[in-house]
């Protein structure tokens, strides 16, 4: 099915005209635009275009939600109308980055590093959920499935091994993504990350229980031979150092000698610096951050849950929610689980519920349809259509979702709900929560299914939303 050229022209005019578009690309569902001046966008006119399901701005990009399949046709028509030329997502990101302040650039850098490895982490979370079903007592029987049916024990063991691989070699994943982001060779980033968890090093998870810590003696300087399993900060900083050294050397060493000199020198220098300084310092910083976060939730779990559960959705608007991926991974590596991610999953459900409630309030068929489809999307962990297409358009729906999420966050924080991994948000999220916490998590889930719906519906009726 072809798209209406006039509708695409209306989109172009609504975002400020073709002269306001620096670069444009698209993903599976959205147009991604780098605009010269977002102040020229007429959001009301834009969202009245029949093809548009919502719009929002993040990380310097203005994104227009179109829908799967259709967005490709709209993009090609836009290229033909504006003459801007087709570009890659990286080109649009680079153009959009020019509009960011230093804090936004720092947040974007973290997002650029962690988002590419997120599929591996989410997959690990789903597989851990399957392992939980097989090994958790009290789910199907009083004892675990592997005890009732011992033939399943080795199946569960293999699943657990596959699931744990991403976390066992997490520095390797981060090293690959971080060095690539900082302009170095991704392959060297993998080597750097794996070097920090080499089996010859004392496993970081055994550090606290070790009677004696092995050391290197570097000309009288004692260096602990400790690995950095589950740690985030050491490999992040080491990756920046590696990429910087590699870039420096490539500019100064002739091409004929680069293969022999660049990688060995870069890895050797980074390796020594990592074990002598970067590792110990960032390990201490990471432990301090972990202890601070844990202390807040131990001292006042209800307040911590209210704040994080309520603030997560607004953080998504700014893009700053990506920074908490690093905190989640640090918690998982340090204490064996994260109490933050379950609240993220409940926030997704709350946004979906508010959008669903709007379906019963609205008369406009386009918005009713968008409310239903975006609610389903949010229930499966993708909240952008619900948040930007429906709830933010009717602010009371967004506020209602925040209230429900905050209450649910307070409840599950008080009941110490944790997840061993980041998984798929929304309704399937319970699979990635520790089985002993399922009951408490289901209570939180019920809150996000009921409270946002009642608040949104009642508020909408009082405002006589049509």
Image (tube, helix red, strand yellow):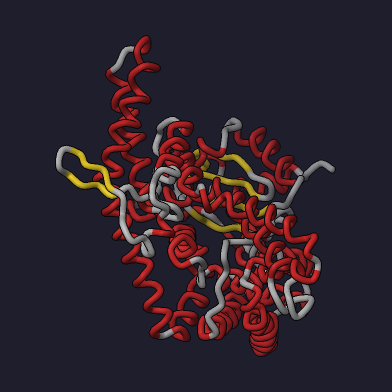
Res. 421 image quadrant: bottom right
Residue at point 74% right, 56% down? 155
Res. 368 image quadrant: bottom right
Q: Is residue 135 left or right of residue 410?
A: right
Can you give x and y, in whole percent of width and height, for residue 265 in the image? 31, 26
Q: Is residue 262 above or below residue 377?
A: above
Res. 138 image quadrant: bottom right
Question: Farthest residue toward the front?
Answer: 211
Q: Is residue 248 above or below residue 102?
A: above
Question: Farthest residue toward the left?
Answer: 220
Can you give x and y, in whole percent of width and height, for residue 281 in the image? 26, 54
Q: Is residue 228 left or right of residue 412?
A: left
Of the 4 image quadrants, the one containing the C terminus is: bottom right
Of the 4 image quadrants, the one containing the N terminus is: top right
Q: Is residue 191 above or below residue 342?
A: above
Q: Is residue 56 above or below residue 116?
A: below
Residue at point 32% right, 29% down? 266
Question: Farthest residue toward the right?
Answer: 1
Can you give x and y, in whole percent of width and height, for residue 72 in the image? 71, 41
Q: Is residue 114 left or right of residue 348?
A: left
Q: Along the line of sight, which residue is nearer the eye, 319 or 6?
A: 319
Residue at point 78% right, 60% down? 152
Residue at point 67% right, 76% down? 354
The answer, for residue 326, to whether it is visible in the render is yes
The answer, for residue 14, to whether it is visible in the render is no
Can you give x and y, in whole percent of width and height, for residue 231 in the image? 41, 54
């Amino acid at each position: 099915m072809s798209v209406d050229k006039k509708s695409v022209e209306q989109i172009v005019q609504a975002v400020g005209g073709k002269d306001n578009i620096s670069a444009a690309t698209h993903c599976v569902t959205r147009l991604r635009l780098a605009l010269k001046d977002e102040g020229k966008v007429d959001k009301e006119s834009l969202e009245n275009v029949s093809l548009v399901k919502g719009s929002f701005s993040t990380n310097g990009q203005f994104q227009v939600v179109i829908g799967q399949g259709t967005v490709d046709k709209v993009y090609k028509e836009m290229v033909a109308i504006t003459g801007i030329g087709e570009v890659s997502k990286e080109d649009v990101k680079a153009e959009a980055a020019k509009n960011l302040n230093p804090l936004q650039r720092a947040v974007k850098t973290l997002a650029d590093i962690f988002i590419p490895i997120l599929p591996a982490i989410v997959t690990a979370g789903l597989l851990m959920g399957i392992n939980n079903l097989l090994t958790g007592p009290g789910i199907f029987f009083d004892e675990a499935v592997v005890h009732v049916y011992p033939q399943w024990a080795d199946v569960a063991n293999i699943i657990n091994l596959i699931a744990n691989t991403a976390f066992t070699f997490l520095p390797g994943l981060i090293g690959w993504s971080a060095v690539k982001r900082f302009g170095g060779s991704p392959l060297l980033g993998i080597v750097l990350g794996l070097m920090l968890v080499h089996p010859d090093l004392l496993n970081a998870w055994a550090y606290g229980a070790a009677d004696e810590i092995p050391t290197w003696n570097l000309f009288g300087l004692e260096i602990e031979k400790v690995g950095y399993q589950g740690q985030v900060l050491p490999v992040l900083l080491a990756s920046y150092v590696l990429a910087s050294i590699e870039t420096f050397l490539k500019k100064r060493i002739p091409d004929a000698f680069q293969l022999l000199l660049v990688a060995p020198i870069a890895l050797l220098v980074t390796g020594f610096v990592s074990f002598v300084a970067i590792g110990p310092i960032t390990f201490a910083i990471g432990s301090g951050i972990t202890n601070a976060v844990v202390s807040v939730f131990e001292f006042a779990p209800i307040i911590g849950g209210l704040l994080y559960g309520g603030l997560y959705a607004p953080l998504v608007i700014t893009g700053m929610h990506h920074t908490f991926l690093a905190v989640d991974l640090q918690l998982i590596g340090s204490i064996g689980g994260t109490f933050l991610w379950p609240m993220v999953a409940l926030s997704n459900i709350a946004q979906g519920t508010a959008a669903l409630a709007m379906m019963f309030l609205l008369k406009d068929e386009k918005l009713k349809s968008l409310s239903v489809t975006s609610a389903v999307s949010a229930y499966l962990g993708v909240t952008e259509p619900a948040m930007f297409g429906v709830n933010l358009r009717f602010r009371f729906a967004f506020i209602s979702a925040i209230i429900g999420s905050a209450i649910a966050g307070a409840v599950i924080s008080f009941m110490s709900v944790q997840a061993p991994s980041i998984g798929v948000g929304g309704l399937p999220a319970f699979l990635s929560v520790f089985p002993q916490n399922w009951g408490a998590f289901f209570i939180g889930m019920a809150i996000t299914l009921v409270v946002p719906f009642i608040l949104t519906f009642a508020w909408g009726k009082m405002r006589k939303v049509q």
